[in-house]
Amino acid sequence: MDDTLSIRAATVDDVGLLFGLIGKLAEYEQLEHEFVGNAELLERHLFGSVPAAEAAIAERGDNAVGFALWFTTFSTFLTRPGIWLEDLYVLREHRRGGIGRALLAHVARLAVVRECGRVEWSALDWNSPALTFYRGLGARTLDDWRTLRLDGAALHALGV
């Protein structure tokens, strides 16, 4: 049995697989109530005429074991692009085997090649294993910044 780890760019054929992994992430983060999208929207926004994000799939042999999904940002202070890592997820039974590190290294390599100034992401404050993992890779927590969100009725009210 081949258990070689590989990281590859997601393709349109992976939409169902990615959508399923996103569902598992929502379950892990106890956010199933916010998982309201669908595979068709995911396909449109990852592989449509104006892609909004990119994704990579981690595979051990022929089995998908995780994914990363990210999009380009821009820093006015650095005057350079950056990458926002929206999600990084490894199936529970495959954690602690270097897969998360490999996925994050993949995104970091893209950032270096694209001359990005940084890679950023958020993590839930209760997710100690993830926070420990990220800090172990050299990531630092920006305690003086707060993430804000405009959505639902408030987004609609402001946007019309």
Image: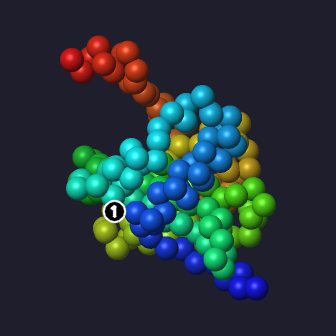
Spot occupied by residue 114 in the image (x, y as percentages of width and height): 31, 69
Seen at 55% across and 36% down, the residue is 35
Seen at 66% across and 59% down, the residue is 90
Spot occupied by residue 103 in the image (x, y as percentages of width and height): 56, 66
Asked which secondary structure carries label 1, the reply is loop
Quarter location, residue 58: bottom right
Spot occupied by residue 117 in the image (x, y as percentages of width and height): 35, 59
Quarter location, residue 46: bottom left
Q: Quadrant of the C terminus?
A: top left
89, above or below 3, in the image: above
Q: For the image shown, how many numbered marks are present on the structure?
A: 1
Is 46 on the left or on the right of 93, as rendered? left
34, above or below 16, in the image: above
Q: Amino acid at mark 1?
A: Cys
113 or 91: nearer the viewer: 91
Residue 86 visible? The answer is yes
Q: Quadrant of the N terminus?
A: bottom right
Q: Which residue is mark 1?
A: 116
In the picture as drawn, the residue positioned furthest to the bottom comes out as 1
36 or 152: nearer the viewer: 36
Seen at 71% across and 81% down, the residue is 3
The colour scheme used to paint the residues is rainbow
Residue 82 visible? The answer is no
Q: Could you classify mark 1 by the number of other residues whose Cα lies within 10 Å: few (under 14), some (14-19), or many (20 or more)?
A: many
Spot occupied by residue 83 in the image (x, y as percentages of width and height): 39, 56
Quarter location, residue 159: top left
